[in-house]
Amino acid sequence: MYLALKEMARSKVRFGLLVAAIALLVFLILFQQSLQNGLITGFIGAIRNQNSPVLVYSVDGQRVIQGSVLTPDLEAAARGVDGVGEVGRIGQGTFTALPTAERLGGASETFDTSVIGYDLGEDGRGLGSPTSLSAGRYPAADNEAVASSSDQASGFDLGDTIRILPGDEVITIVGLADDAQLNVTPTLFASYTTYEAAVASANPDARGLLPNVLAMAPAEGTTPEQLVANVNAASPDLDALTRADAEANTPGVSQVRQSFQLIFLLYGLVVPCVTGLFFLIVTFQKANTLTLLRAVGAPSSRLVGSLLAQVALILGSGIALGALLYYPISQQRLGGIQLRFETSAAIFWAVLLLVLGVGSALLAARRVLAIDPIEATTGAGVGR
């Protein structure tokens, strides 16, 4: 350790630049990780964090809530299968909405807003409602809604009112739920009747509104997977999915994950390559010094230990600095995406990069182990 610290103290600029490079890479990795999770949550958070174990789409809807339409025949077929416990309707539409909070001066800009209508049940927690609330209460009547907490600053906070345009349909926000957006837009969970009124407000000519999706809970003794199989067997035009599958198979989600995974793979390759190449070059540059140390009796294990200590210190410092740089950024919103500092992701990448970095530095350690002390008398070194 003494040799490692002594050399680093003498070459502050060289080692400092490497620490800065690793910190920048870690910063970018954590930013991309948070961006990926925030983007996916913004797309399907309302599906992931609703309480229905099974969602039933029409096949033509291609697993998009707004694109799915269940005719009376399909709805009857789904309701009549074995293993069905509770069933509720879900309707979803995207509307132009105008928040009119007093704290915003009575008016603000308009937003494309998703309204999800569900059968409230006795306590507002009918199938399709948010799993839990971060503030307020569930809707108890029509024209009340739960909003996503990430949209509070835009006029979707407790007590705020939202007007659906064109028309005069007004919805009051009575509750907030975390990570409950759909399609990266402000999202409201309201009664099915409120959803129907919103559709009529935006399009007075709309008639015979049909549910987009059925929310189902299996009867006692039936698993969600069994219920899914029963519904799908009832009609080739029905597409039942468990909540997890509905989330994962929403169009666009897998493509987003694959794109970011490719980016993460490249990051995972860059850090060990940079670290290994740096220490390999440094080892060659100090070949004569290492040869002399071996000639005067310094064991290979001490020299290798010094090298690996430098790698661990530099990687550790770079990872810590990168995380510190990212932390203030992680508290911000990027467009409609809420960034977060994800401790589990930071730990995962820290361990992975340390392992890969130390592993890549073993190439330089092999050169140290290959030093022959007798070469000190011939002027040869590591590079021979």
Image (tube, rainbow, N blue to C red):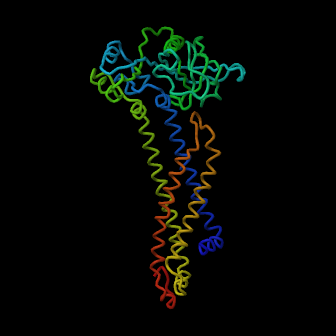
| Residue at x 44%, y 47% (from the top left corner) | 261
Q: Is residue 24 left or right of residue 232?
A: right
- Residue at 65% x, 20% y: name it: 160
Q: Quadrant of residue 331?
A: top right
Q: Determine the residue located farthest toward the bottom in the rendered image.
A: 377
Q: Which of 88/93 is in front?
A: 88
At x 35%, y 14%, the residue is: 71
For this rendering, which residue is in front, 115 or 77? Answer: 77
Q: Eyeballing the image, is 102 above or below 268?
A: above
Q: Which residue occupies the foreground of this view, 203 or 226?
A: 226
Where's residue 256, x and y in %? 45, 40
| Quadrant (top left/top right/bottom left/bottom right) for the N terminus | bottom right
Figure quadrant of the C terminus: bottom left
Residue at the extreme front: 221
Residue located at (38% from left, 29% from top): 242
- How far from the left and from the top, in percent, is residue 312? 55, 64
76 versus 175 height, above or below? above
Q: Position of residue 189 (x, y in %)?
A: 53, 21
How many numbered marks does the figure carry? 0
Residue 158: x, y in percent?
64, 23
